[in-house]
Image (cartoon, rainbow, N blue to C red):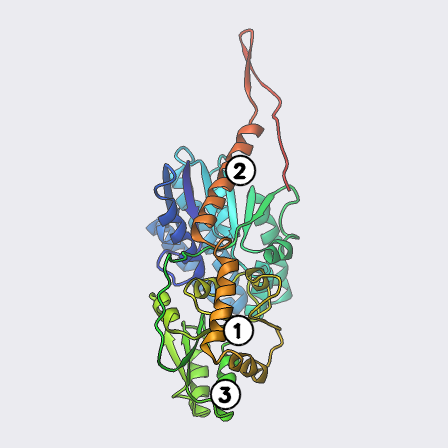
Amino acid sequence: MRILLVSSATQTSKTGVTAHYNRLLAQMADRVESIQVITPADTPFLAKKILGAFRRVASLLGQDGKVLYMELDNFISIWISVRRKGAQSIDLVHAQDTTSGAAAALGLARKVRVIVTCHFNDDPLTEYREKYKLSSLTTGILTKWYKFLFRQSDAYITVSDYTKNAAAFLRPTKAACTVIHNGVEFPQKLIRQGGGPFIIINIGTIEERKNQRLLIDTAEILRNRGFTHFQVWLLGEGPKRAEWEALVKEKNLEGYVSFLGYRSNVPEFLQRASLYVHTALNEAWGYSITEAIAAGTPVLALATGGIPEQFDRQNPGLLPKETTASEMADAILRYQLPESRIRLANRQMHYARDRFRLDIMINKHLAFYQDVIERQERSTPKKLLVGDKILSAPAFTTSKP
């Protein structure tokens, strides 16, 4: 099997999408004939120059121009690079976003099946509306654009049932779609670093959606209640970092809340943490939640998006989405004692280990790849020799939900 991964996110970008396809590259290298990746970084020099000129023009149109340019840039970059590569050495394209998937499908003249993993939380249109103040005209253009993009790919992967249902209105009704939860490596032996203060950790982009402001307010309440032997570690970078660092200083919480920036050695921090607290207001899947569970760190998380799918039916560790800072402080204080944290961590580990391991995720991907390829073979018309003429036999097609 010869796999081509395509993505609008480059291999050096510090995003969850990049981390995901880099895991696919590493884990599948010995299990398929070949696996390669194409991103906008592979765009030919001249094309980059031309697209750069479009960017300068688009900037004159404000947020609307910026968004439309991003879509155009990603689409054309992937289309050109994939077209140069050609279809002869590819059995399947696995795109990491809808734009790159459609660009690859059209760049290869639809000669190769294309699967798209949907990494968005609800759907790309909703995410654009929430992030940018777009005009009704631009919103209408993007709606038509995404309906066009979704029609170009053959099959879809979502990371949760939540996302599968939320974006169903954009997918073609006959397109295959499966749920494959993100997986992490679960060590054979847990390494925990005890002692020291009570450490509360959160990992993610410092932004409104990730909602780390809730932990800052919670830290203030914990201190005011006299619980002072604790620290909050915020790992990540983002647009709200400077504002929330100033807030920490304003509340005199510098000794309690630390912004540690982007870190590549996340497991080492999780091994030292007492609790992982996930505060995102919306998320298709909390990858860092599973990372924490795999490290033996108990997790508290707001029940939003696809996150409830990461917990068993009794939902140990799940909190209502509307949880206030005072209620979060109550929840944290319930796990002051190591014994209570060990019980929670063991229960969460028991549920996650056989569902969200990295090897399980890879096996499910490979099985879906093979299924999509076999569908193509079954739907390709067979050539029959009748006398001295070659005729196309009727295709045998199948349709799966």
Q: Residue 44's spot in the image, x, y percent?
A: 35, 49
Labels 2 & 1 near each other (Cβ < 8 A)? no
Determine the CA span between mark 3 and mark 1: 17 Å
Q: Earlier in the sequence, mark 2 or mark 3?
A: 3
**For this rendering, which residue is in front, 322 or 81?**
322
Instruction: Give the x, y percent position of residue 174.
Output: 64, 41
SS at mark 1 in the image: loop
Q: Say what secondary structure mark 2 lies in.
A: helix
Extreme residue in the front direction: 339
Q: Taking 215 as reference, is 70 above or below it?
A: above
The disc at residue 222 is 3
Residue at image x 57%, y 56%? Answer: 160
Res. 102 in view:
no
Which residue position holds label 2? 372
Report whether 124 appears left or right of 1. Answer: right
* Mark 2 or mark 1: whose residue is earlier in sequence: 1
- Quadrant containing the N terminus is top left
Q: Amino acid at mark 2?
A: Val
Farthest residue, direction top: 387
The image quadrant that residue 202 belongs to is: bottom left
The residue labelled by disc 1 is 279
Question: Of marks 3 and 1, which one's residue comes earlier in the chain?
Answer: 3
Q: Is residue 174 left or right of residue 84?
A: right
Looking at the picture, which amino acid does disc 1 mark? Thr
Q: Secondary structure at mark 3?
A: helix
Indicate the quadrant where residue 382 lies: top right
Q: Is residue 339 above or below residue 325?
A: above
Question: In front here: 318 or 98?
Answer: 318
Q: Which residue sits at x=43%, y=55%?
A: 20
